[in-house]
Amino acid sequence: MKKAEIVRSRATITKAHPTKDQIIGAFLASQDVRASTKYRYNSTLKQFFNWIEARGHNLQEITRIEILQYKEDLLASGMSSLTVGSYITSVRRLYDWVEANRMGPNIAKGIKSPKRKQQFRKQHLTETQGRDLLGYCRERGLRDYAIISLLLHTGLRTIEVVRANIEDITFKMGKRVLLVQGKGRDEKDSFVILTAGAYGPIETYLNSRPRTKTGEPLFTSISNNNQGERLTTRTISQIAKEGLRAIGLDSREFSAHSLRHTTAVNILRAGGTLEDAQGVLRHSNPATTQIYTATIKEELRLQRAPEELLDRFYN
């Protein structure tokens, strides 16, 4: 948006009754953030304004009380605390902007996002389940087997697999690696190591593709409509979900992201440290990785089951 357009958009907010589109448009024009963040602000703020209109509130007269009620209504609708937090963050950003431009008071200042319990909602796979999943995918085809094997061996996110190109497979200090463009990153400035177990299925799959070029996506579609094109995160999630269902894990707790959790848990199971798991998963905050220790403790608790020691006293 040009400078003159930004000034014009901003000026509309000073009118007695600006429309929600005028407010959102002026706010977005002033934000120096990624396009994806602007998209999220746009959709979540429209939800906020729709909520205001549905309850007959006047935008110029709503107070902190209404915003707190909005937060409670979002939680009551069944949204996760993480999603509600995203919606409330957008409202706070909007009113920060309103205050900074002297358009009104910041009635959202200090309103907190809902707390969420520091644990993973997705379940990891046991050793047997991991092997069963690989066995199923091996029968499904070379591509799907290579994808699931890569996810289990490296803990990559689905978006990171989608972004990978053939040329991203290279070497560092004699070890084969895959360069990774992580979540929220603009460049492929990280990597995961491709062990023989991870690279073998990929090599076999690539050899099966005719006339591959280094600039091509690492994994491509085989559907009639999109053959040869880059896969989507949705497709990779579906591949994982289908395999999980096939081995009896048909619940919301198991998804493609479960394979990332499995990677971390297996590193700890094998004697790796939290720092090892953090490095593989590329967590910026070690506290995120530390949550996995709770999984290991729970497994030991279930295996040892001290309650079972008490049966002999009562039978």
Image: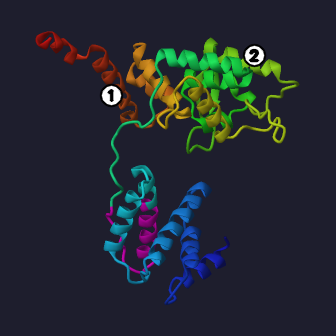
Residue 63 drawn at (x, y percent): 34, 77
Circle 1 — which element? helix
Judge left or right: residue 59 versus residue 63: right
Q: Nearer the viewer, residue 65 or 245?
A: 245
**Residue at x-position 50% and y-position 72%:** 50
Answer whether residue 105 is magenta in the image.
yes
- Please identify the quarter of the rendering in which residue 141 is found: top right
Viewport quadrant of the N terminus: bottom right
Mark 2: which amino acid?
A: Thr
**Residue at x-position 59% and y-position 25%:** 246
The disc placed on residue 294 is 1
Mark 1: which amino acid?
A: Ala
Q: What residue does disc 2 label?
A: 204
Magenta region: 88-111
The CA span between labels 2 and 1 is 37 Å
- Please identify the quarter of the rendering in which residue 93 is found: bottom left
Residue 114 drawn at (x, y percent): 34, 54
Q: Neighbour class for label 1 at 10 Å: few (<14), some, many (≥20)?
A: some
**Residue at x-position 35% and y-position 73%:** 66
Q: Residue furthest left?
A: 313
Check the image and report above or below for 63 versus 217: below
- Please identify the quarter of the rendering in which residue 98 is found: bottom left
Q: Earlier in the sequence, mark 2 or mark 1?
A: 2
Residue 183 drawn at (x, y percent): 56, 41
Circle 2 — which element? helix
